[in-house]
Image (cartoon, rainbow, N blue to C red):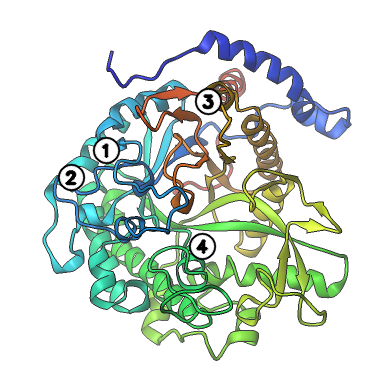
Amino acid sequence: MSKHTAAMNFPTVDTALFLLMMLLSPLFISCDQTTLKQSLDPSPFPSNFLFGTSTSSYQVEGAYVSEGKGLSNWDVFTHTPGNIDDGSSGDVAVDHYHRYLEDIDLMESLGVNSYRFSISWARILPKGRFGDVNSEGINHYNKLIDALLLKGIQPFVTLTQFDSPQEIEDKYGAWLSPESQEDFGYFADICFKSFGDRVKYWFTINEPNMQVTLSYRLGCHPPAHCSQPFGNCSQGNSEEEPFIAAHNLILSHATAVDIYRTKYQKDQGGSIGIILNTLWFEPISSSTADKLAAERAQSFYMNWFLDPIIYGKYPAEMMNIVGSTLPKFSSRDKEKLKQGLDFIGINHYTSTYVQDCIFSACKPGPGASKTEGFCLQNSQKHGVPLGEPTTLFWLNVYPQGMWKIIKYIKERYKNTPMFITENGYGEICMPNSSTEDLLNDVKRVEYMASYLDALITAVRDGADVRGYFVWSLLDSFEWTYGYTARFGLHHVDFATLKRTPKLSATWYKHFIAKHKLIKSQSPKHTSKHPQF
């Protein structure tokens, strides 16, 4: 047994799980007759439904300058004092780069049939398109993909998840320049060519809507661009740069999809999409103004990216308010955008109230400005939170939002196939928290149970959802939180890097096994929706 193999204390955890299931039984069986009937029905998930976990390269890999890798924007950002809460970095992270076989064993133990990970762009192209391809980076991902397939686990590959070569930032400002489209297309082409014979599910970009907000409006992610009143940065323009970066990200997606469709898709037989962070925006009142504000909030957050990709133009609400600021799509851009996507990746964690700021006076706050759509976001209404608060200021537990956002996407985008690419529960580690407390993650189990129940309702309502990925397989580096926040199904001792399954890992294992058992005992049932 490897010295890195996680300790498996399943008898103790199983006992805790049994007690927990008794406590959580109201989530699964309700006195309400409709819910009771549903709980007795066969699993709504088709037999080809994918259950998985997610990670991202910078958050788990480590090996930040090993075997030819170049510096990424996050390598540089985390090495600047004051940017990360605990002063840490992803230099080592949880060493997934060297321990991937152990981590695949953890996936196999869970019973998942898919794994979403991202590729370190700077590991493949240390200097972007201005330098050579790093063959050792290609070899690493080949070994990872082959090891996953050997265990019957489908690789879902995200081309970039916030990290990119520092070289492209230094040369031309990365996403603020149209040159980024050429660089991203070059990178995507190499990945399709190198891995596409085995990878059948591709995501171009993870959460571009979060990236432009955090990097170019608030300035808390690299390259740390912002202006007052959004933040205090040495450079940037919060009212213009987010729209420029977004435009280039949208067209970078279109460039990659165009390359895949014209050069690789027919022979390789895969499919391709993009991942958006999603929030459910709940009107703070029943007034028409607040209902319109909730719709406007979606347009300035998620639809900002999906509308151009699917319909070839920015949302009407954005055009009406910031039309003069939005870059224009050329006729060539519009042709490229027609390549669209095959599916939508949905990262969903939480929901928030929204108040109209066009017809009502609003205090300053998230969403209230013109460039955010005049829709103030608030986690509370008259002092009462929307859902159960957590130790993360932005995360309230509101599972109804999962069903509502899936329904919204289903209706707005004509039931384009969907994958829940991230959903999970995070917690800030308190100084007095013991390892035992962290392993006995009852709150995470409650969260997963309630959100999966909401997903079941959406699937029963006809939403074409084809997979669910928990964030995350492991505790890891959580961006500006460093290692102070934990989302993993497996606890990681950051001093020794030892992995240990939490209660939630065992719960998820049982949930997947229950789904498989129901399917094996039921008449064969696959998705009624056409497959890729």
Q: Earlier in the sequence, mark 1 or mark 3?
A: 1
Q: Please name the residue that numbered disc 2 is placed on.
A: 66
Identify the element where label 4 is drawn.
helix
Identify the element where label 2 is drawn.
loop
Kindly check if marks 2 and 1 are in contact, taking CB atoms under 8 A apart as contact.
yes
Q: Earlier in the sequence, mark 3 or mark 4?
A: 4
Q: Earlier in the sequence, mark 2 or mark 4?
A: 2
The residue that appears at 46% across and 53% down in the rendered structure is 480
The type of residue carrying mark 1 is Tyr
The answer for how far apart the CA atoms under marks 2 and 3 are is 31 Å
The answer for how far apart the CA atoms under marks 4 and 1 are is 26 Å
Q: Earlier in the sequence, mark 2 or mark 3?
A: 2
Q: Is residue 228 visible?
A: yes
The type of residue carrying mark 4 is Met
The answer for how far apart the CA atoms under marks 3 and 4 are is 28 Å
How crowded is the residue under tag 3: few (<14 C-alpha within 10 Å), some, or many (20+)? many
Identify the element where label 1 is drawn.
helix
Figure quadrant of residue 433:
top right
Kindly check if marks 4 and 1 are in contact, taking CB atoms under 8 A apart as contact.
no
Out of 322 and 331, give the one closest to the viewer.
322
Tag in front: 2 or 1: 2
The residue that appears at 32% across and 79% down in the rendered structure is 178
Q: Which mark is residue 210?
A: 4
Q: Please name the residue that numbered disc 1 is placed on.
A: 97
